[in-house]
Image (tube, helix red, strand yellow):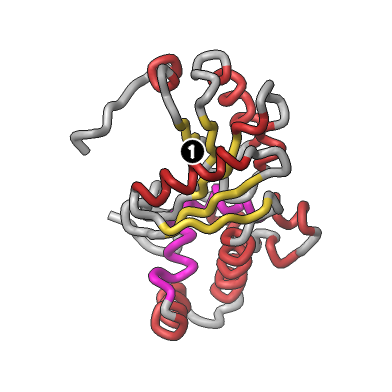
Amino acid sequence: MGRITGVSRLEEAADGADLLVEAIPERIELKQQLFLSLQSLAPAHTIFASNTSSLSIGGIAAPLADPGRVIGMHFFNPVPIMALLELVVSDVTRPEVLDAARAFGLRIGKETITVRDMPGFATSRLGVCLGMEAIRMVEQGVASAEDIDKAMVLGYRHPVGPLRLTDMVGLDVRVNIGEHLARALNNPAFEPPALMRQMVAEGKLGQKSGQGFYRWG
């Protein structure tokens, strides 16, 4: 923590930066606007990375003067513990940008995988599908959220169950991801269940609101 410095202005974050990683809400226009602002502030060599879990890296990069500097660097919750870093390359991401992102991941103790810029990449496409089905099971009364999660932790050796993970990510965030993947892949398996939409409407967003499938202190 002593090596982290907080700033409140984009100019301060961009000044002399080698790598900028955004982790703002999952709306492509917000990410595009942020990178458009940063391209006039950051050095020409700065890599622009997105922590998006589902949006197109090529789409995020498209408005930039140099879209080849953009790559996906998808970290996982909780970031200090989870070993995986998913690197997502678009058709125009330069090889040296991928090499630098991979080297950075290794320096901070992450195992990296490289995937093509497809909807949901590798991890969200599998994880969100599993999470939506788990919510449908709660909706249908198959089992409690706790027992469904216990089944995946003990039976499949997942570090955390899909419903607790949904709480940690945020139900509102996962609704947006699910809607995007359902459209992009033309697959109803990703469509957010009615129970999930109801919980979001009631403000039960998970850990950040104190209530989701679990109560959070």
Quickly name the residue at label 1: 23
Q: Amino acid at mark 1?
A: Ala
The residue shown at (68%, 62%) is 190
Q: Quadrant of residue 3?
A: top left
Q: Measured from the top left, where is residue 107 in percent x and y?
A: 35, 47
Say whether residue 191 is left or right of residue 74.
right
The residue shown at (60%, 29%) is 30
The residue shown at (56%, 72%) is 134
Magenta residues span 158-179
Say whether residue 185 is left or right of residue 67.
right
Q: Is residue 171 magenta?
A: yes
- SS majority, magenta: helix
Q: Residues within 10 Å of mark 1 (few under 14, many from 20)?
A: some
Q: Pick the residue in front: 23 or 16.
A: 16
Q: Measured from the top left, where is residue 54 in percent x and y?
A: 63, 50
Q: Pick the residue in front: 92 or 159.
A: 92
For the C terminus, give its image quadrant. bottom left
Can residue 201 be seen from the camera position used here?
A: no
Is 26 rendered above or below residue 86?
Answer: above
Q: Helix or strand or loop: what does disc 1 sit on? A: loop
Say whether residue 214 is left or right of residue 65.
left
